Image (tube, grey):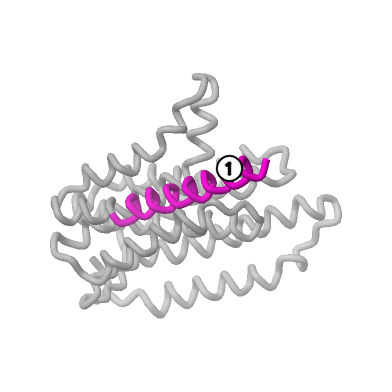
Amino acid sequence: MVDYALARRSRNVASNMVHVLLNLLLGVGAVLVTVLSNNPTLGLILVLASKWRVFAVRSRYIWLNFKSNLVDLIVGLSVVLLAYFSGAEFLPVHFLLMAFYSVWLLFIKPKSSDFMTSLQSLIAVFMGTSAAVIAVMMTNPENVLTLVIVEFIIGYAGSRHVLAQSDDRNFNFSTMICGLVFAEIAWLSHSWLIVYPFSETGIQIPQLSIVLTIFAFLYNYARAAMIKYRDDFRFKQIALPVIWGVLLIGVIVILFSNPKFHI
């Protein structure tokens, strides 16, 4: 019996080590092959291949699995695209992306608490929007339709990731509304997309990423409060974060929209 317990513990340790190693290989490899090949195809294939379990179920569960894994997929694809559009020479941003994606896979993605679920959602919104804005502006700046569609998906996925675990019976409607608001904001801001560059590091942060991340936090926070208090809901219960968020967005848009940041 003791031998069996030791053998089982050894297998668990070995399994955990393999799991960590594979995630590190994915986190580093997705960025590495993208930069070395100067092509995002291999990196995107690696990320998609890592999601094989989404499709390893009965056909009627594939769509549900796909929606449940959208946040993780958005983060992975965004890392590859950001690495690609940062250039074919290694810059600090590439190493930051390797480190971030590895931390995401090992420590952030597996968690399921309310706080970590919200954090995962906000990271997906920030990373996904950053990749979408930079990709569109560097390939076809006039392609507003692509940006609008992608932002709808990001808004839908980010909101669904949080609200699907709540008691919201109408969370599908709530997530659709969030996606539509994301799409509307993307359409309105398309003609004046601001990017904050840190040229020496290769880091580029679109203003839209910051604005939508703040909005996503406020939307999910307000919706969660409405679900919690139901008929007793009052605006004062969410007033402080809403006012803070609106003021922060106002400061960013008014004071940090200098044309020198314009792509």
Where 253 sits versus 45, above or below?
below
Nearer to the camera, 148 or 96: 96
Q: Quadrant of the N terminus?
A: top right
- Please state the horizontal and vertical placement of residue 57, each as a whole percent of the image: 50, 24
**Residue drawn at 16 percent across, 48 percent down:** 39
**How many numbered dots are placed on residues in this image?**
1
Residue 241 in percent (x, y) is at 65, 70
Count residues near mark 1 (Cα–Cα under 10 Å), then give few for <14, some for 14-19, many for 20+.
few
Q: Residue at x 56, y 43 (%)?
A: 7
Which of 44/237 is in front? 44
Q: Is residue 163 left or right of residue 56?
A: right
66 left or right, relative to 187 = right
Can residue 84 be found in the magenta stretch?
no
| Quarter of the image where the C terminus is located | bottom left
What is the residue that sits farthest to the right in this orientation? Answer: 232
Above or below: residue 256 compared with residue 146: below
- Helix, strand or loop for the magenta stretch, by majority: helix
Range of residues picked out in magenta: 1-28
Residue 187 seen: no
Spot the residue most to the bottom: 255
User: At x 16% / y 61%, what residue is drawn?
Assistant: 87
Q: Amino acid at mark 1?
A: Arg
Inspect the magenta stretch and tell me whether residue 16 lies in it.
yes
Label 1's element? helix
Q: Does residue 203 appear in the picture of this structure?
A: yes
Q: Position of residue 120 (x, y in %)?
A: 52, 56
Q: What percent of the width, then of the height, locates residue 159?
A: 57, 49
For label 1, the residue is 8
Residue pictured at 52% horizontal, 75% vertical:
248
Left or right position of 111 against 212: right
